[in-house]
Image: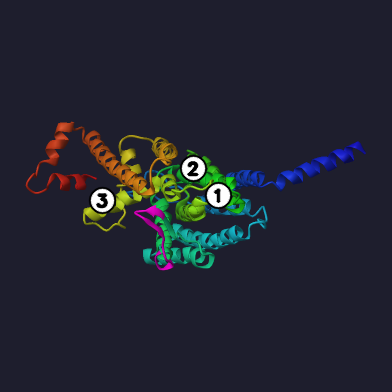
């Protein structure tokens, strides 16, 4: 009899735990991580049997053929973990996360096909817009407030809808572009996912929080193999597209919820700035690469080895050290944001970000020069003489642009 009472008490306590949203998010994180860790070895074995491995090319930072279907595990893990719970108490958020799954599935098959076959860029862009439009047009999710940046607040749908589509497409491809060294894209997304998930959890948006923690758990499981020397796997376009889509989803939803900052003490009046700071690495790297290509009269979409992670590798850093540098950059900027956000306006914060981007460009220039100096065993004076070899042909500004 006492044993039956004890079992009933334990069952009641267990059910109470499972019904608590905080524990649900934590369990989803652990389940997603466990599913990823369990499924990735199977994916690696199947990739080997079918000879579906990525061969190194001129842009690669790896020398061996490596499976690149880690995105399959990320996709499956986050869906299994997220749908452990019914999410019936939040109809609006549950509907949005369901629409997000529709967009995820479109991008999943797009990325899967692109990892196997090379797709036409125009078709990829069209399908990305289709995936994003399901969430924006059917779910009504859009950035329709600029939070006073340059005096702009509410913006009409004719501007907000295409602007939100642009944000999604830009972030999706920005995450795809930084996925060039072990742990970089996955680590940045892990940090951002935990940050967005924590805010959603603290503000009682549990469906959104559960999806963010599920993604972070799946990425943690993936990173265990992404850094492995014997069982390495890449997330591929399959993973980078869905991770970029989710980060854009969380960022836009975060900004949207904080529009009520005037009436809500828990909201941020400069939410767009915090969203940019959390995703500062993919945003800055993509802006830098596109800007340099355009200034040098090249197509912004033509691939090269000019990403900052390539520059750091050329300076002798390992993959882990390179990723750690960018993880630290994200964390330092977030800490800096929380130390200063109460004292500056959003317009001032915008100019601070512009200043940081200029510093990023300058750092990239000197790191590229340093890499060239070490590679050719030159002194700094030799580098300066080489850059001034044709003083009449190129101005100092043009020489700086060519060296970015």
Q: Position of residue 145 (x, y in %)?
A: 43, 58
Q: Which residue is mark 2?
A: 191
* Local SS, label 1: helix
Residue nearest the viewer, comparing 101 with 113: 101
Q: Real-space Cα distance between discs 2 and 1? A: 10 Å
Q: Is residue 221 visible?
A: yes
Tell me whether circle 2 and circle 1 mark residues in contact (CB < 8 Å). Answer: no
What residue span does the magenta drawing correspond to? 147-159
Q: Is residue 304 visible?
A: no
Q: For residue 35: magenta?
A: no
Sequence-wise first label, 2 or 3: 2
Categorize mark 1 by other alpha carbons within 10 Å: few (<14), some (14-19), many (20+).
many
Q: Position of residue 293 (x, y in %)?
A: 26, 53
Q: Quadrant of the N terminus?
A: top right
Q: Which residue is mark 1?
A: 212
Q: With 283 as the anchor, is 378 left or right in this view? A: left
Q: Which residue is mark 3?
A: 292
Residue 27's place in the image compared with 150, above or below, is: above
* Local SS, label 3: helix
Categorize mark 3 by other alpha carbons within 10 Å: few (<14), some (14-19), many (20+).
many
Sequence-wise first label, 3 or 1: 1
* Local SS, label 2: helix
Sequence-wise first label, 2 or 1: 2
């Amino acid at each position: 009899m006492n044993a039956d009472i004890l079992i009933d008490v334990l069952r009641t306590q267990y059910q109470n735990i499972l019904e608590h949203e905080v524990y649900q998010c934590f369990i989803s994180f652990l389940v997603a991580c466990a599913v990823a860790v369990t499924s990735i070895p199977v994916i690696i074995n199947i990739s080997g049997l079918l000879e579906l491995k990525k061969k190194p090319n001129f842009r690669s930072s790896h020398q061996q053929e490596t499976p690149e279907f880690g995105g399959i595990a990320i996709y499956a893990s986050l869906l299994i973990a997220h749908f452990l719970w019914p999410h019936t108490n939040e109809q609006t958020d549950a509907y949005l996360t369901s629409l997000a799954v529709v967009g995820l599935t479109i991008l999943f098959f797009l990325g899967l096909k692109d990892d196997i076959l090379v797709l036409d860029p125009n078709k990829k862009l069209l399908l990305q817009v289709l995936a994003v439009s399901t969430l924006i047009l059917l779910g009504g999710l859009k950035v329709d407030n600029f939070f006073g940046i340059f005096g702009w607040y509410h913006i009409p749908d004719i501007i907000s809808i295409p602007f939100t589509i642009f944000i999604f497409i830009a972030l999706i491809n920005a995450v795809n572009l930084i996925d060039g060294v072990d742990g970089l894209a996955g680590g940045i997304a892990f940090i951002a996912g935990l940050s967005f998930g924590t805010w959603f959890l603290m503000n009682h948006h549990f469906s959104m929080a559960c999806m963010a923690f599920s993604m972070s758990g799946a990425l943690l499981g993936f990173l265990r193999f992404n850094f492995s020397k014997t069982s390495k796997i890449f997330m591929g376009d399959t993973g980078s597209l869905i991770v970029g889509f989710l980060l854009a989803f969380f960022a836009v939803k975060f900004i949207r919820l904080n529009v009520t900052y005037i009436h809500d003490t828990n909201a941020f009046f400069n939410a767009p700035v915090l969203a940019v700071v959390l995703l500062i690495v993919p945003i800055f790297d993509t802006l830098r690469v596109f800007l340099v290509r355009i200034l040098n009269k090249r197509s912004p979409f033509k691939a090269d080895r000019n990403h900052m992670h390539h520059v750091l590798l050329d300076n002798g850093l390992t993959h882990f050290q390179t990723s750690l540098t960018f993880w630290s950059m994200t964390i330092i900027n977030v800490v800096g944001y929380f130390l200063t956000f109460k004292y500056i306006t959003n317009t001032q914060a915008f100019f601070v970000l512009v200043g940081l981007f200029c510093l990023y460009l300058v750092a990239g220039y000197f790191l590229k020069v340093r890499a060239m100096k070490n590679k050719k065993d030159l002194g700094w004076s030799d580098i300066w003489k080489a850059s001034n070899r044709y003083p009449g042909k190129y101005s100092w500004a043009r020489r700086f642009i060519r060296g970015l």
